[in-house]
Amino acid sequence: MKEKPFPGNLNDPEGIAIWVRRFLEHQRVRHYAPTTIRATEGHLRIFIEWAIDRGIHRPNELTKPMLEAHQRWLFYYRKPSGKPLTYATQRHRLQLLKGFFRWLARENVILWNPASEIEMPRLERRLPKAILSEREVEMVIAQPDLSDPIGLRDRAMMEVLYSTGVRRAELTRLSIYDVDAERGTLTVRIGKGRKDRTIPIGERALHWLARYNDEVRPSLVMLPDAGTTFLTEKGEPVDVNALSMLMRRYISRAKIAKDGSVHIFRHSMATHLLDAGADIRAIQEMLGHVQLNTTQIYTQVSIQRLKLVHDTCHPAAKLAPSRPTEPAVDHAEDAADAAELIDALGSEDDEDEHDDGPSA
């Protein structure tokens, strides 16, 4: 796909477009995550067009009232679906803009930072979005047509999502070398915060992953093989947004009167583990949460302990389902932390909507 031309006057060395490109180079040189750079570029492209439409061509022409006007524009913007941007998405885009202006001030491009005093939108504290019950999870993952190779791939993806609770980007980056079937573990490379983590994966997910790797992946892979696990019919890694749309269709097809996408598997997995009595710190580590918002102490848990918790509490940990008669861990005293964990997952759900905002 041909890249869209960069908006703005690239012949003006002091133009806002040139300074945005220099800022993106600054991020690349300092090894910012590619997803962060893409998100920054996407919104700053939109901001450049917004500024040019109002006769603003250089960073030093921007004032605090102008940036507040842009904030109002984000508030009133409507996506093609007619829905507004969530407050979390608005806040995320404003944070990217504030980072750009903070850098401009540090580079002495502007005498003062007009974005420094922008009041950020307050985030809502809402009840969690839809969570699938164990029965509903089984209904959803039964939707793919297993006689179709792509259907078998989709079943394997859902099994991995539900078993491990990985994020959608983490699934699409998964390499065939990141799964250790003998140990029953999966390693997430450069997860959120640019950190690796090793987490349990259940026998059932490993069974479907092995079927996909043996029966389907060899027919999809294009040489040279980069090792990406889940591939499209063209041999390319599955795109995160395409993955979201695919999972949304399967959930809709299951007719369970609930709406959701990739994140619903992560949210449901954490909830089911909590309901079964799993230790909250173990769930934290599986999900890749460094700490809960109200928790200052983080307990490192060994992979053996995580495996024990996962095998004991996850509904789909084994090929032959079995559940303990009593919770493995009494977590009554951790009720507040459990609520924070679910709330954190709800906030993550909003983060997935950042790709659905205004596009240049």
Image (cartoon, rainbow, N blue to C red):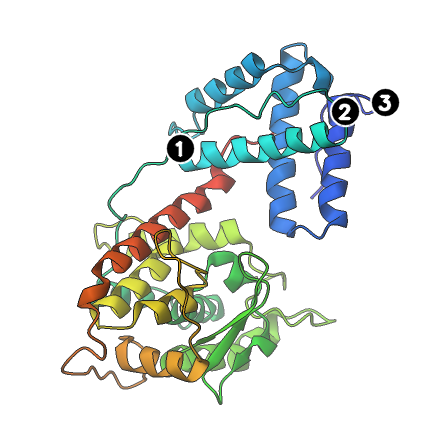
Residue at left 76%, top 31%?
107
The x and y percentages for residue 35 are 60, 49
For label 2, the residue is 109
For label 3, the residue is 11
Secondary structure at badge 2 equals: loop
Q: Is residue 167 left or right of residue 111?
A: left
Q: Amino acid at mark 2?
A: Val
Q: Is residue 34 above or below residue 79?
A: below
Q: How many marks?
A: 3
Quadrant location, the N terminus: top right
Q: Let me know if residue 140 appears in the view.
A: no
N-terminal-most mark, 3 or 2: 3
Q: CA distance from mark 3 to mark 2?
A: 17 Å
Instruction: Pick whichever, 112 or 199, lies toward us.
Output: 112
Instruction: Pick whichever, 127 or 233, lies toward us.
Output: 127
Residue 280, quarter of picture = bottom left
Q: Amino acid at mark 3?
A: Asn
The x and y percentages for residue 123 are 36, 36
Residue at left 21%, top 50%?
257
Secondary structure at badge 3 equals: loop
Residue 306, quarter of picture = bottom left
The reply to whether dot 3 and dot 2 touch (C-beta < 8 Å) is no
Q: Residues within 10 Å of mark 3 (few under 14, many from 20)?
A: few
Residue at left 62%, top 14%?
63
Q: Residues within 10 Å of mark 1 (few under 14, many from 20)?
A: some
Q: Nearer the viewer, mark 3 or mark 2?
A: 2
For label 1, the residue is 87
Q: Is residue 321 left or right of residue 49?
A: left
Quadrant location, the C terminus: top right
